[in-house]
Amino acid sequence: MNEGLTRRDRLRRDRSLLIMVAPAVVLLLIFSYAPMVGVITAFQYYDPLIGIWDSDWAGLDQFQQLFADSRFWHALSNTLYLSFVQLILFFPIPIVLAMLLNSVLSERVRNFVQSVVYLPHFFSWVLVITIFQQMLGGAGAFNQWLRSNDLATWDVMTNPDTFALLVTFQGVWKEAGWGIIVFLAALAAINPGLYEAAAADGAGPWRRMWHITLPGLRGVIVLMLVLRLGGALSVGFEQFLIQRDAVGHEAAEVLDTYAFYYGIATTNYSFGAAAGLFKSVISLLLIWGANKLAHSFGEDGLYRK
Amino acid sequence: MSQRPSWQEPPTLAGQSTKGVTLGGVLLIVLVPLWIVVLTSLSTKGAINRAGGLVIWPDGITFEAYEEMLKGPTVRTALLVSLGITIIGTAISMVVSVLCAYGLSRSGSFGHRFILVLLIVTMFVSGGLIPTFLVVTGLGGYGQWWALILPGAVSVFNILILRSFYSSTAAELMDAARIDGASDWRILWSVILPTSRAVTAVIALFYAVGYWNSFFNVMLYMPTESEKWPLQYVLLTYVNRGVGMPGSVNAGFGMAHSQTAPLSLQMAVVVLTLVPLVIVYPFVQKHFRTGVLTGAIKG
């Protein structure tokens, strides 16, 4: 397509394409790339009145403060712990649900279940947490029932000990249904002839699942794991931000809320930027490492080798 | 009802009932809370008192809470703000994304590779919360409507989905149209858009839901101007956090100020944030698989 064309010719030919791309590029330059440059505030004593170009340099001072802050380490260990709990309790559910749904013969039932379980994905976190508050909170339906049966009440929403389970359950309620969509697609791509041949050879339903279904899902499962590991430091900012006051920062402080409260809310911008940069760098390393791991299992992961 | 393939064992009672109970349980977990919320919003004060709070069985239905809610300015304003941000934001996002996706749909076009990399990098690297906040406020965005729309207007993921559709579905069509002398604008408008309605609808829904649901940017850029708050922020403040409604008597919650609103009213606000979604959802839902997956997987 490009043979014999000079750059000038191609530029003239594709002028309208470039004009079409321009608005998106401009928006990304302003709201994605400019903040990347703004990361240098993490190495300054940034003062909004002086501006980014004239603020004093701090070297690694902000990072030293960050690493000396016990609340930061607490937020980090909370984040990793919550990530781990979510990985164990959340991750398998969409896979199981997708296999279960896929085994239902009636298409009408399948479609109905899908449209119901996809729905909460489109709810806001404010809405989801409000609904949970009404169901499990101190004045919620669950405690209402406990009270009417003269049982001791249990305010799930403000209990720091069970908070990790609560947020995982909220995550499952909101996203597990939507999560099945990729697995359903992978299941639909498995050649039905394989099942038929296996059944003819005497393999029962469980053996067919083990030898055909699960290997068929392997690629998607690895991809989802890579994404999950890469996002290990992002456990759901809004979800924690909304609930932090009710349950206390001991249980609900994660890296994102830490950067927000000690960076923006206290206008200590450079410090917050340092916390954010720390998180971004580790996250990039995690994605890279998870991909390496995927490659060593012979899978593509997020990008090919 | 599709047929059971001949090689498959006939279903066993135990297997069928386990499946049925599990799927039934999943449906209940999603639907029961919604049922309770909707029912409580429609219940009379007596019914709520008798139930001791949330209402599980219908026992006196009334639309009072909704009338009350829409009488006062607080929720009405918030509803208008939310609708405005959602409609304007989605329009901006769609125009920008569709144009960009088409502009990148032809491999080998000028700067194609470079621009694509420029986009994809932003999916993995970000300046983070605080530098973004500083850029937006530095541009004078504090308290401005555009601060709620423009910073998140472009989703590279959505652009990539659209792009993979445009470049796969209509490569021949596009070439043919080009040979006929149609401009790229013409091709986009009369060839691409009519043949990709499903994916366009799904992406528009994604954007619209994002705008409708957002509250954090309000917290960042207009936390104190309660007359500019969208519905989600009103929900967060007056229902989730139980703050009393401002503006003296009957500011939409039928109570004197500094008192938490009655439960039916609170639930009516919850339902109100759900209504637009429930209206649009059935029309778009059937396209999720065809629309999104093919794009996401190919992309």
Image: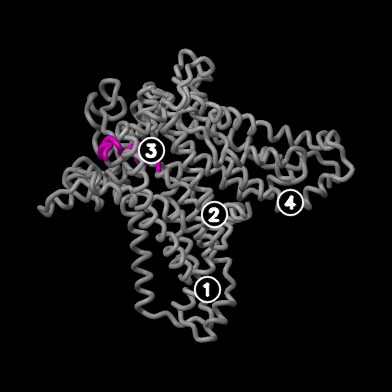
Relative horizontal placement of residue A268, taking residue A247 as reference (left or right)? right
Q: CA distance from mark 3 to mark 2?
A: 25 Å
Give the farthest residue toward the left: A150
Q: Residue, x 85% and y 41% (percent of image)?
A: B181
Q: Is B178 on the left or on the right of B193, as rendered?
A: right
Give the distance between the C-alpha atoms of the residues marked 2 and 4, in whole angstroms: 36 Å
Residue underneath mark 2: A292
Nearest the viewer among A164 and A124 is A164
* Subunit ID for the residue under disc 4: B
Residue B276 location in percent, x, y?
45, 41
Drawn side of residue B260 relative to residue A153, left or right: right
Q: Quadrant of the C terminus of chain A?
A: bottom right
> Viewer-nearest of labels 2 and 4?
2
Residue visible at 53% across and 30% down in the picture? B151
Quick check: B218 above or below A122?
above
Q: Earlier in the sequence, mark 3 or mark 2?
A: 3
Residue drawn at x 24%, y 53% as measured from the top left:
B57
**Residue, disc 1:** A212
Magenta span covers which residues? A236-250
Three-letter amino acid code at disc 2? Lys
Secondary structure beneath dot 2 equals helix
Tell me which numbered mark, 2 or 1, is placed earlier along the sequence. 1
| Sequence-first tag of 1 and 3 | 1
**Label 2 Cα crowd, 10 Å radius (few <14 / some 14-19 / many 20+):** many
Residue density around tag 1, few if under 14, some if 14–19, many if 20 or more, within 10 Å:
some
Task: Identify which residue is drawn at 37% across, 69% down.
Answer: B20
Q: Which residue is mark 3?
A: A255
A247 part of magenta stretch: yes
Q: Which residue is mark 4?
A: B170
